[in-house]
Amino acid sequence: MIDQMLMKLRARDNVSELEEQVLRNSISEVRKVATDQVVVRADVELHECVLLLNGFMCRYKDLANGERQICELHVAGDFVDLHSFPLKKLDHNVMALVPCEIAIVPHDRVMQITEDHPHLTRLLWFSTTLDAAIHREWVLSLGRRTAVARVVHLFCELHVRLGIVGMADADGYDLPLTQQDLAECMGMTGVHLNRVLATCKAEGAVTFERRRVRFHDLERAHAIAEFTADYLYAEPRPR
């Protein structure tokens, strides 16, 4: 049930059998959520964290006129709101972009982990700092990268993140999001994104068709986006 989360953690550090069992025991229930269902609402007091088991979810903020900016995508194995444990409420919403399965981890069980399992606590803390690193890279994309580089960079990022949890191969990965979802990640209109995707295809590096990202020249895609995976900290780290 938590295989992807364990793959994500073990890509960076060791997780003992005891720590694995503690994580499994921390889950109080598993739920299914529908596409577009808001799982965490801004400014609502929270008493539990949400672990994404299957599907894609996003964090987003919106304006009074209904325009939405997606601030980060979440894949299987991600805690989508672990920072709600110290904060108790979030300043943004978390929503399912496709049908998802989630696990609920009550805050009191997170508290027990922090008190009894210091190494596991550091692993969970790492997850929140990784989210912050991803967020900073997205800010750089939105502020400084060209539209084409911005889109290709996201495709490259997801290639690494999904690869860690066994959901990507050398050529690409399934991405069951709409073009409007991607536009809201990129700060673009749907029309603009469609033009950018056409340019990406013409460049011969990467395509997004039939809800699959396919790399035709991964090295060229990295060059277009100036992508390096350093900010994803995907290598094992010293304790």
Image (tube, helix red, strand yellow):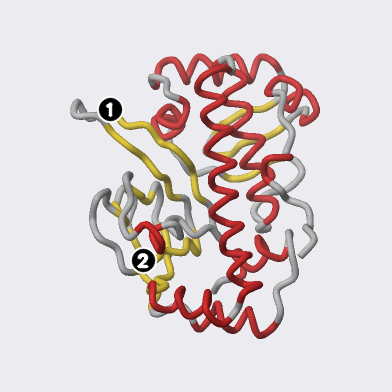
Residue at screen point 40% across, 50% down: 98
Residue behind mark 1: 67
Badge 2 local density, few (<14 within 10 Å), some, or many (20+)?
Answer: few
Q: Which mark is residue 32?
A: 2
Query: Is 87 placed left or right of 66 in the picture?
Result: right
Q: Which mark is residue 90?
A: none
Secondary-structure class at tag 2? strand
Badge 1 local density, few (<14 within 10 Å), some, or many (20+)?
Answer: few
Label count reads 2
Residue at screen point 65% across, 85% down: 18
Q: Quadrant of the N terminus?
A: bottom right
Query: Is 63 placed left or right of 188 in the picture?
Result: left
Secondary-structure class at tag 1? loop
Three-letter residue code for mark 2: Lys
Distance from Cα at disc 1 to Cα at disc 2: 27 Å
Query: Is 28 placed left or right of 137 in the picture?
Result: left
Residue 63 placed where, x, y %? 25, 29
Q: Is residue 43 above or below residue 53?
A: above
Q: Is residue 136 above or below residue 204?
A: below
Q: Quadrant of residue 39?
A: bottom left
Residue 170 placed where, x, y %? 77, 44
Three-letter residue code for mark 1: Glu
Compare residues 145 and 154 and report the one nearer the observer: 145
Which badge, 1 or 2, comes first in the chain's sequence? 2
Residue 151 placed where, x, y %? 57, 26
Q: Quadrant of the C terminus?
A: bottom right
Residue contact at pointers 1 and 2, CB within 8 angstroms: no
Compare residues 181 and 116 and report the one nearer the observer: 116
Q: Residue furthest left?
A: 64
Query: Is 102 placed left or right of 220 in the picture?
Result: left
Residue at screen point 61% across, 34% down: 155
